[in-house]
Structures are given as C-alpha cells and as structure tokens.
Amino acid sequence: MKRVLLFDSGVGGLSVLDALAASGAGYELDYAADNAWLPYGLKSDTQLRARVPALLAALAAQWAPDLIVIACNTASTIALDAVRAAVDAPVVGVVPPVKPAAAQSQTGVIGLLATPATVRRTYTDDLIAQFAADKIVVRFGSAALVEEAERRLAGAPARNEAITEAIGGLFGAPNGQDVDVVALACTHFPLLAADLAAAAPRACLWLDSGAAIARRVAQLLSPPPGLARARRAGFTDARQAHALAPAFAARGFSVLAGIGADPGFDTAPIAGHRLRVSCSVAARVHCAR
Ligand code: DGL
C-alpha cells in the first residue's frame, strides 16, 4: 500500500485527508501537525520557509512516505519549492482554488477566504492574475476561523463569532453582495463550511481543494481501489493532542505520537528524536525524546 503523509499546522489537513479517504483509493495515511507553531497564518514568510522544509525533511526520513501532501495553503504558497528541494518523495501542495472558483462564478465576483498570510501572498496574486483576471476577487483573511476549527475538533462548544466576522468581512466588503462562489483557501475552513454557508446572506458555491488534491495524488501514485487506512498522527505539541484524540480516532488513526517539539526543534531536529507510539485508540500521547 502506498503511504501518504499529510502535513498541516493543525487539524486543517483532516479536510484533505477526508477527501483522500472518500476517493476510494487504498492508501496508508500518516498525518503530522505542527501545532506547536499554530497558527501559520500569523507567522512570517521567513519563519515558515525555514521551518516547514526542515520539519518535513526530518519527518520524511523517519516515516518514509511515498508522497507528501502539504495540506496547508499557508505553507504551500510560501514553501512548496523549498520542501520539494528538501525531500526525495514527490510533494503535492494545496493552493487556493481560484481557478475553479473563477470558472464557476456567474456574477463575476468570487470570494477568497484564507489565512491573513495567504490572502496577501504574491503566490495568491499570481493565481488571481492567471485565472481570475477578468473577475472581481473579494479577499478576507481570518486567523479566528482557524482557531474555531481547532476548538471544535478538540471538543469545545461551537462559537459563532469567527463565522459571523468572516461572513461580514466577505459579503460586507465592496462588491461582496455579488459574491456567488467562495474559494476556501485554508484547509481548516471546509471543516466549518456548513456553518459558513448557513451564515451567508445568499446561496453560494463553497469550493475547497480536497477533491482536486485526491485526483492529483491518485495520478502520481496509481493506488489500487480500496479503503484508505489511517495509521499514525504526530504532533509537535503533544500536550494539545489529547483533546484532539477523538477527532483522529474517528478517522481511524490508532496511534498518536509526539514528534520532536519546540523549543528543541531548531537545534535538535525531529530525526534526532525517537518516536514512541501508543497503540491505544484512546490515544494516550507519548512524547519521547
Ligand atoms: N490550514 C492552514 C491553511 O490551509 C493554515 C492554518 C494556520 O493558520 O495555521 O492555510
């Protein structure tokens, strides 16, 4: 079975994992979350370009994936080339679904909901210039939605402030009343899509990149049809992983692990740490150094 490693700052990559699992392909799925550094959307480009390739190179050396998915728009739009240079396995990045959004808009006004970092990236400007030059693109950056998705998957009761703020920011902006397609350009946001759609002042098409990523991974790996099997999930801040255990167990993960975490990461890369894993789905998290 081909082994795919999905990487995100936190739980957002689970929206991509769900799309891979739904594609009917027989993969073995590993997951790594750099939750010690969450949220990426508030980190500088320089910080992410240094950290993400180093982290993935160390992890790839230990977990030997056949393919890596950077299931994070914020990391992909700044560090995809650097990660490709740092690892041997093929790397698929998740980037804002501007092209399909532009293609499907009837009004010519599309919304782009992403992290504060992704909305201002040159990568995003270039995508818009290439695929949506004849459209009006209303952008809104939210770190609060990332936090809300994290809270909910950790079992906290839903709060609506972040949803209300994002919907107001998008549809209340100049031209926002005409948005008919919204590109969800952060992998955390599909986890909140139902609430976002319910709060929107009009019916819209809400697009994410999950299915496109699943197609790209299938092209590269030619997997046999079958059931995807989730295997282990690693966290750079293992303490936070306890609360997330049910969300990961629900997706079939049987092992949660700590992966060499801050503050030692910069000087002692993950490869220098032994992963010790728990076999219980109840997901006791061990962080072994
Ligand atoms: N899930 C990530 C993305 O797709 C970012 C979340 C964060 O800000 O850490 O952009």
Image: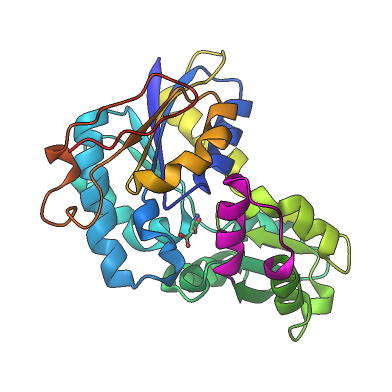
What kind of colouring is applied to the model shown?
rainbow
Q: Residue at x 68, y 59 (%)?
A: 101
Q: Is residue 149 magenta?
A: yes
Does 133 appear above or below 249?
below
Foreground residue among 11 and 113: 11
Q: Quadrant of the C terminus?
A: top left
Q: Is residue 137 magenta?
A: no
Foreground residue among 268 and 185: 268
Does 94 appear above or below 21?
below
Where, by quadrant of the figure, is residue 142 drawn?
bottom right
Place of residue 253 in the rendered image (x, y in percent of width and height, measured from the top left): 48, 25
Q: In the picture provided, is 213 more to the left or to the right than 75? A: right
**Magenta range:** 142-162
Place of residue 169 in the rendered image (x, y in percent of width and height, measured from the top left): 71, 78
Does 123 appear above or below 239?
below
User: From this viewpoint, which residue is outermost toward the right?
Assistant: 202
User: From this viewpoint, which residue is outermost toward the bottom?
Assistant: 174
Q: Quadrant of the N terminus?
A: top left
Q: Residue at x 44, y 67 (%)?
A: 123
Q: Is residue 87 visible?
A: no
Q: In the picture provided, is 45 more to the left or to the right than 194? A: left
Number of labelled discs? 0
Q: Residue at x 64, y 51 (%)?
A: 156
Q: In the picture provided, is 209 more to the left or to the right than 70? A: right
Q: Residue at x 48, y 68 (%)?
A: 118
Where, by quadrant of the figure, is residue 66 drawn?
top left
Place of residue 120 in the rendered image (x, y in percent of width and height, measured from the top left): 48, 76
